[in-house]
Amino acid sequence: MKKTFTISIFVRCVIFLVKGIWVRDVTGLENLPKNEPFIIAPNHSSYMDHFIVGSIILQYLKKKLYFIAKKEHFEGVSQKSWHRLWNNCITYIPIDRSKGEEALKTTLSYLKHGGVIVIYPEGTRSLTGKIQKGKTGVARLALWAKVPVVPVGIMGTFEILPKGKNIPGMKKATLHFGKPLYFNIDHNKKITKSLLRKITGQIMKEIAKLSNQKYNF
């Protein structure tokens, strides 16, 4: 029997605080597919991205999320404990980035079973707050699983908590969710570097537009 999705009191409190303190505006939530698996692809410039994106989507979809994160985020006792507190609502998938495409295959089963995956195409946080060159992992995963990608533009989180800082400032962030990008015409093509780079460029240009930036890579 399918388990009923519930949000714990702890997570509800975090969502309330995050939205109340650090979120100014959110648009485009209606673009999130309700009845199919998909990938959420935001730009990434702060640890606050996890909390804000997770809080907004959990409350809207009322569905468990799967975040892909580098394995180094799971090595400390405090980090493992923190992730367990979110376990009913968010599952963090540790990825060894040195293993390339093999690392992504872990996530395929979640998409095949209707899951929603959150992955940052840039691969790591921006040191300047400006959008970086996208890696091809999101494109590869979208083609493997034959699912759409929802681009997300985040503005303001770099000012809240840039890399190197431990205490978030009292700034506000804005999120814009774009329309799903479907790559049906590419599903039967051979997955080549040029195809992956083309699709990655499409995704990154939409993210840049939604975050009021330009993508020049």
Image (spheres, rainbow, N blue to C red):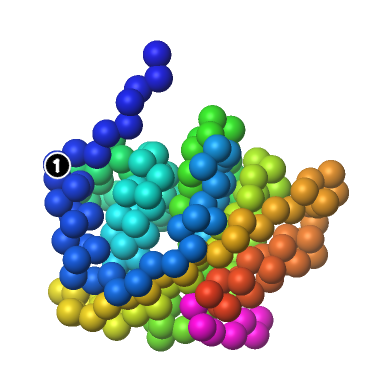
Judge whether residue 120 is colored magenta. no
Query: Of 169 and 73, which appears nearest the observer?
Result: 169
Give x and y (percent) for residue 100: 58, 53
Can I make out residue 19 in this image? yes
Can I make out residue 87 in this image? no
Q: Quadrant of the N terminus?
A: top left
Residue topped by disc 1: 9
Give x and y (percent) for residue 50: 33, 60
Dominant secondary structure (helix, strand or loop) of the stretch shown in magenta? loop
**Left of 133 or right of it: where is 198?**
right
Magenta residues, start to end: 211-217
Query: Which residue appears at 40% of the width and 19% of the height?
Result: 2
Give x and y (percent) for residue 197: 72, 66
Q: Is residue 133 above or below residue 11?
A: below
Query: Of 26 and 153, which appears nearest the observer?
Result: 26
Location of residue 65 by image quarter: top left
Q: Quadrant of the C terminus?
A: bottom right
Query: Which residue appears at 30% of the width and 55% of the height?
Result: 55
Q: In the image, what residue type sits under mark 1?
A: Ile
Q: Secondary structure at mark 1?
A: helix
